[in-house]
Amino acid sequence: DAGVTQSPTHLIKTRGQQVTLRCSPKSGHDTVSWYQQALGQGPQFIFQYYEEEERQRGNFPDRFSGHQFPNYSSELNVNALLLGDSALYLCASRPTGGLSYEQYFGPGTRLTVT
Amino acid sequence: AQTVTQSQPEMSVQEAETVTLSCTYDTSESDYYLFWYKQPPSRQMILVIRQEAYKQQNATENRFSVNFQKAAKSFSLKISDSQLGDAAMYFCAYRTYSGNTPLVFGKGTRLSVIA
């Protein structure tokens, strides 16, 4: 079992550009959540996808959008990048019918905006 | 809104000694989960231990144990017989018991282990 995988590992973008991050959930998991972890901070919830729809959203602007595919993989898109978007982006997956505490994290994508 | 506070940005411990990391939280819910996650330099967030709020008994996982004080809204992590591999960022996290709610994290405590 590969666990939760994310790509790319690192990414450098310029202000104003757009970026797409990808996540493949753990086998058997159908719910995907995205978190932003700024340097020296704890992760903050961006949004959650289930059945290809955004189910919950944290306090992030509309520049942050996502998508979930029929195979449960997910993308996080950020438009009009700001310097403050530089962070580690973590993907987490869980099985909807599983135990409430189950959540597995990927290794993250480090985004640097210059 | 629920909040999680970790008041110790950094801690250090001698190898084989015991260290306690502090966490307080604020919630109006009565049923919830509390977690401690470990994030080593590899960045992978690893679940160390969890506590269900309805359980009075403190959770234990090998060298890791918690002191859960529900009335005080306190949830500390004790690491016994510290090992070099325990060096990492430790995050305290909360989520409600029901539904598919997200985790709420503290800012973390960086633990160094001195050989």
Image (cartoon, rainbow, N blue to C red):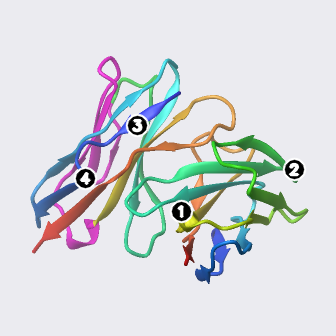
Of marks 3 and 2, the one in the foreground = 3
Cα gap from disc 2 to disc 4, whole angstroms: 38 Å
Instruction: Report the side of A76 relative to B41 (left or right).
Output: right
Q: Residue at x 49, y 18 (%)?
A: B28
Cα gap from disc 1 to disc 4, whole angstroms: 22 Å
Depicted B99 relative to depicted A111: above or below: above
Q: Which residue is mark 1?
A: A84
Instruction: Report the side of B72 relative to B105 (left or right).
Output: left
Three-letter residue code for mark 4:
Pro
Q: Residue at x 55, y 68 (%)?
A: A83
Three-letter residue code for mark 2:
Glu
Q: Which mark is residue A51?
A: 2
Determine the residue located farthest toward the right in the rendered image: A70
Q: Which residue is mark 3?
A: B4
Over which residues does the magenta segment extend? B58-87
Of marks 2 and 4, the one in the foreground = 4
Question: Where is residue A60 shown, x and y percent of the image?
Answer: 65, 48
Q: Is residue B80 magenta?
A: yes
Question: Where is residue B19 shown, x and y percent of the image?
Answer: 16, 51
Residue A20 visible (yes or no): yes
Indicate the secondary structure of the residue bearing disc 3: strand
Residue A1 visible (yes or no): no
Cα gap from disc 3 to disc 2, whole angstroms: 30 Å
Q: In the rendered structure, which disc, 2 or 1, sits on the residue that comes first in sequence?
A: 2
Depicted B4 relative to depicted B29: above or below: below
Indicate the secondary structure of the residue bearing disc 1: helix
Three-letter residue code for mark 1:
Gly
Depicted B43 relative to depicted B52: above or below: below
Indicate the secondary structure of the residue bearing disc 2: loop
Q: Which residue is mark 4?
A: B9
Q: Which mark is residue A17?
A: none
